[in-house]
């Protein structure tokens, strides 16, 4: 997963990640939000942790959506996750907008 940062005019923090070649979209989303929020990916780890991705979106449906979009028209999905606005597109870019 590679990372780019920037700011939008309304001073909201926006960070963009690229899904790595060996990563699933859902793995990359969780890792990206954990990185931006400084929270752990598991409640078994010490400190603050992320909510389950299932509380925001069906991970299996998300993976299937982007798997099919590789051959169909371009797809973008936007949803809230652990207090962040997450936008994912079929080219593998994940944009995290800060809370």
Image (cartoon, helix red, strand yellow):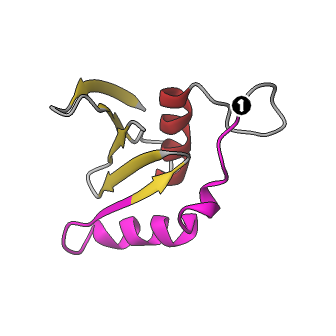
Q: Quadrant of residue 59?
A: bottom right
Give the image location of residue 36, x and y in percent: 47, 29
Q: Is residue 30 above or below residue 70?
A: above
Q: In the drawing, does residue 76 fall left or right of residue 59? A: left
Residue at 37% over, 65% down: 66
Give the image location of residue 76, x and y in percent: 28, 62
Q: Residues within 10 Å of mark 1 (few under 14, many from 20)?
A: some
Quadrant assignment for the N terminus: top left
Q: How many marks?
A: 1
Give the image location of residue 25, x and y in percent: 46, 52
Q: In the drawing, does residue 55 fall left or right of residue 3? A: right
Q: Is residue 14 magenta?
A: no
Residue at 56% over, 69% down: 58
Q: In the drawing, does residue 44 fall left or right of residue 66? A: right
Quadrant assignment for the C terminus: top left
| Disc 1: which residue | 48
Q: Is residue 24 above or below residue 9?
A: below
Q: Is residue 76 magenta?
A: yes
User: In this orientation, which residue lies closer to the viewer: 47 or 67?
Assistant: 47
Q: In the drawing, does residue 89 fall left or right of residue 51? A: left
User: In this orientation, which residue lies closer to the viewer: 40 or 8?
Assistant: 8
Q: Which residue is most to the right? A: 44
Mark 1 residue element = loop
Residue at 46% over, 71% down: 64
Q: Is residue 5 above or below residue 98?
A: above
Q: Quadrant of residue 30?
A: top right
Residue at 20% over, 34% down: 10
Q: Which residues are magenta?
A: 49-78
Q: Which residue is most to the left? A: 9
Give the image location of residue 8, x and y in percent: 19, 32
């Amino acid at each position: 997963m590679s990372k780019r940062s920037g700011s939008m005019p309304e001073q909201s923090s926006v960070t963009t990640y690229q899904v790595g070649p060996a990563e699933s979209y859902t793995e990359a989303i969780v890792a990206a939000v954990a990185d931006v929020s400084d929270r752990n990916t598991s409640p078994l780890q010490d400190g603050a942790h992320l909510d389950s991705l299932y509380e925001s979106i069906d991970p299996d449906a998300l993976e299937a959506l982007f798997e099919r979009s590789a051959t169909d028209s371009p797809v973008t999905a936007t949803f809230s996750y652990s207090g962040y606005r997450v936008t994912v597109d079929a080219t593998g870019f994940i944009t995290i907008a800060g809370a």
